[in-house]
Image (tube, rainbow, N blue to C red):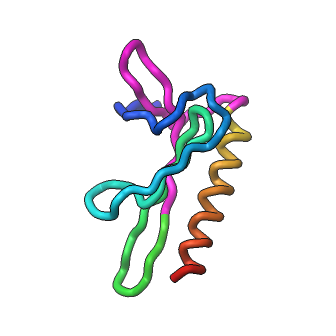
């Protein structure tokens, strides 16, 4: 299991409502971040000449003492949220391609 320090997305892990935010492009920031409960999806934009492709990284946030961490390990109760976020990420990517 790989644990990396992370700052949690806005909202609380107990809030079932998704919190989405756009970030400025450039650097190592995702093009879009979505969250349902403790599950977070970061959508990354990759430009290859005139072609834009997107990739998605999914993680679960948890608190270890006072420090927020992430893991790519999911329990039974995380799986439906993971599937819903994957679906929402797919929809967002399709909307970006349609707008281009």
Q: Where does residue 36 sit, x and y in percent of width and height?
A: 61, 40
User: In the image shown, does 62 or 33 lie closer to the viewer?
Assistant: 33
The residue located at (51%, 83%) in the rendering is 100
Magenta run includes residue 67 = yes
Q: Where does residue 12 sit, x and y in percent of width and height?
A: 54, 28
The residue located at (72%, 30%) in the rendering is 76
Q: Is residue 5 above or below residue 20?
A: above
Q: Is residue 72 above or below residue 91?
A: above
The residue located at (57%, 67%) in the rendering is 93
Q: Which residues are magenta?
A: 55-77
Q: Is residue 48 above or below residue 61?
A: below
In the figure, is residue 59 to the left or right of 83? left
User: In the image shown, does 70 or 21 lie closer to the viewer?
Assistant: 21
Q: Where does residue 87 sit, x and y in percent of width and height?
A: 68, 56
Q: Is residue 66 above or below residue 2?
A: above
The residue located at (70%, 48%) in the rendering is 84
Farthest residue to the top: give it.
65
């Amino acid at each position: 299991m790989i644990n990396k320090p992370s700052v949690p997305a806005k909202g609380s892990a107990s809030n079932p409502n998704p919190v989405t935010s756009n970030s400025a492009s450039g650097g190592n920031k995702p093009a879009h971040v979505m969250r349902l409960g403790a599950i977070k999806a970061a959508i990354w934009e990759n430009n290859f000449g005139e072609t834009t492709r997107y990739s998605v990284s999914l993680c679960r946030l948890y608190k270890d003492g006072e420090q927020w961490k992430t893991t790519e390990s999911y329990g039974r109760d995380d799986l439906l949220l993971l599937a819903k976020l994957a679906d929402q990420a797919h929809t967002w990517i399709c909307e970006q391609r349609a707008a281009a």
